[in-house]
Image (cartoon, rainbow, N blue to C red):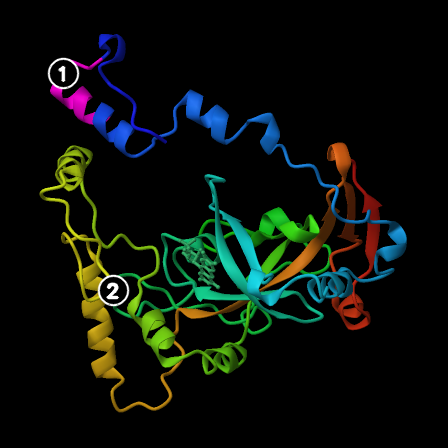
C-alpha cells in the first residue's frame, strides 16, 4: 500500500502523540475500512468451491470416522509439502469459558484418536486450561511449571468421564477442562475436518517414544522454553517511542540474520541464555530425558465432521456422533457412530 499523504485536506493531527500514531499507521499499512474492503471483502476474492467433486454418503466409511479421516489424510492429492498434518487445537478456560486456539502438528492417529505433542506445564497456555492449575502434578522449581498428569486409567481423580457419568460434573477449574477441538483445513481439496472430544494424556513411555525421534536441538528447546510465559514486555507509551525510533532510517537497525544477533533487547537473550544453560546441563547426556511437563495428548472424539466445499456455499457436510459415552464393553467392541448430514 502506498503511504497516505497526511497533508491532504489538512487532516494532519496537531497533537504530537496523535501525529506519531498517524505516522505509524501510514508506515505499517494498518488496515482501515478502505484497505480492509479492498483486501478482505472485494467480490473478486469470494472463493467458489468448484474444483473438487461432491461428497456423498457412499464415500463415507460406514462405521468409523477414524477410518474416514485416514482415507482423506492419505489422499494422494494432499502433497506432503503442504503439511496436511497441520491443524488447529482449540481449548477453553474454566470458569471463564474463554477460548484459545493454536496451530499444532498431528503426530499420530490410531484407533483411539488424534495425538499431538506439546508443553503442558504452563498455567498461562493450554496446559493450565486442559489439566488445571493446581493439583495435577509436582512443581519442578522452574517458576510454576507443572508436570503432565498420568493417563486417566492410572489416575482415578484425573477425570475423563466413562459410561453415563455427566460430563459437567467431572470438570472443574482445578481439574481443568478436557473438552477440546481440532480442525484441519486442506484448501486444495476444499476440505475441512472438525473433531470435538476429550483430551487424555499419553503415558510417559508412549510420549518418550516420540521424544526420542526429535532432534537434539528441539529437545533442548523444549527443556528451555517455559512455553507461553511472558519473557519480556513493554508498556504502551514506551513502545511508541521505540517504534518511532526504529522507523527513523538513520537509527533503524539492520534486521538480525540469526539467533545470535539482535537489534534491541527484547527478551530473546533470556531464552538464549536458558538454552546455553541446558546445553551445559546435558553436555554429557547422550539421550536427553523427556521433560516432565512435555508430552503427547490424544483427542478422543465425540464427534467428527467431514466438510467438502461446494458451489454457492451449498457444502456437503457429514458428521459422525458417538452414540453413547463409551463404557468398557463398547470400548472393547469399538464405539458406535451415528452419521448425519448437516446443513451447509
Ligand atoms: C505450523 C505450526 C506448527 C506448530 N506445531 C506445534 C506443535 O506440534 N506443538 C506445539 O506445542 N506447538 C506448535 N506450534 C506452536 C503453537 O501454535 C503455540 O504457539 C504453542 O503451542 C503455545 O500455545 P499455548 O500458549 O496455547 O500453550 C506450531 C505453530 C505453527 C505455526
Q: Nearer the viewer, residue 154 or 43?
A: 43
Neighbor class of circle 1 (other Cα within 10 Å; few <14, some 14-19, many 20+) is: few
Where are the magenta residues, as a range?
12-21
Question: Does the magenta segment cover residue 19?
Answer: yes
Relative to 178, say whether 80 is above or below: below
Give the residue number, with chain letter if any, for mark 2. 258
Residue sitting at the far right = 58
Q: Nearer the viewer, residue 111 or 1?
A: 1
Relative to 142, say whether 12 is above or below: above
Neighbor class of circle 2 (other Cα within 10 Å; few <14, some 14-19, many 20+) is: few
Residue sitting at the far top = 9
| Residue under the point 46% across and 78% down | 211
Q: Position of residue 19 (x, y in %)?
A: 18, 21
| Residue under the point 86% across and 56% down | 59
Circle 2: element type: loop
Q: Where is residue 200 in the image (x, y as percent from the top left)?
A: 57, 64
| Residue under the point 20% across and 76% down | 277
Q: Which of 264 and 306 is in front in this view?
A: 264
Relative to 88, say whether 149 is above or below: below
Give the residue number, with chain letter if any, for mark 1. 15
Which quadrant contains ligand 1? Answer: bottom left
Amino acid at each position: 500500500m502506498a503511504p497516505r499523504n497526511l497533508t491532504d485536506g489538512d487532516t494532519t493531527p496537531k497533537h504530537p502523540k496523535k501525529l506519531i500514531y498517524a505516522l505509524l499507521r501510514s508506515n505499517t499499512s494498518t488496515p482501515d475500512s478502505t484497505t480492509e474492503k479492498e483486501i478482505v471483502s472485494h467480490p473478486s476474492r469470494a472463493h467458489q468451491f468448484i474444483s473438487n467433486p461432491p461428497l456423498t454418503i457412499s464415500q463415507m466409511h460406514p462405521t468409523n470416522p477414524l477410518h474416514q479421516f485416514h482415507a482423506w489424510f492419505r489422499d494422494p492429492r494432499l502433497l506432503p509439502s503442504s503439511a496436511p498434518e497441520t491443524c488447529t487445537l482449540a481449548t477453553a478456560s474454566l470458569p471463564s469459558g474463554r477460548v484459545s486456539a493454536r496451530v499444532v502438528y498431528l503426530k499420530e492417529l490410531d484407533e483411539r484418536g488424534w495425538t499431538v505433542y506439546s508443553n503442558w506445564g504452563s498455567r498461562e497456555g493450554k496446559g493450565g486450561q486442559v489439566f488445571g492449575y493446581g493439583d495435577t502434578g509436582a512443581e519442578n522449581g522452574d517458576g510454576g511449571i507443572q508436570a503432565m498428569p498420568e493417563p486417566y486409567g492410572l489416575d482415578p481423580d484425573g477425570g475423563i468421564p466413562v459410561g453415563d457419568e455427566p460430563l459437567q460434573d467431572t470438570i472443574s477449574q482445578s481439574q481443568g477442562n478436557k473438552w477440546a477441538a481440532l480442525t484441519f483445513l486442506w484448501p486444495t481439496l476444499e476440505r475441512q475436518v472438525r473433531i470435538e472430544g476429550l483430551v487424555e494424556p499419553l503415558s510417559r513411555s508412549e510420549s518418550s517414544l516420540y521424544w526420542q525421534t526429535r532432534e537434539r536441538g528441539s529437545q533442548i528447546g523444549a527443556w528451555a522454553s517455559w512455553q507461553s510465559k511472558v519473557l519480556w514486555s513493554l508498556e504502551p507509551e514506551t513502545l511508541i517511542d521505540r517504534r518511532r525510533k526504529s522507523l527513523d532510517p538513520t537509527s533503524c537497525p539492520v534486521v538480525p540474520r540469526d539467533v545470535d544477533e539482535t537489534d534491541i533487547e527484547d527478551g530473546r537473550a533470556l531464552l538464549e541464555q536458558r538454552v546455553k544453560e541446558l546445553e551445559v546441563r546435558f553436555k554429557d547426556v547422550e539421550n536427553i530425558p523427556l521433560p516432565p511437563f512435555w508430552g503427547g495428548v490424544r483427542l478422543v472424539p465425540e464427534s467428527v465432521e467431514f466438510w467438502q466445499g461446494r458451489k454457492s456455499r451449498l457444502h456437503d457436510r457429514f458428521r459422525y456422533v458417538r452414540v453413547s459415552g463409551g463404557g468398557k464393553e463398547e470400548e472393547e467392541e469399538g464405539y458406535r457412530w451415528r452419521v448425519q448430514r448437516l446443513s451447509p
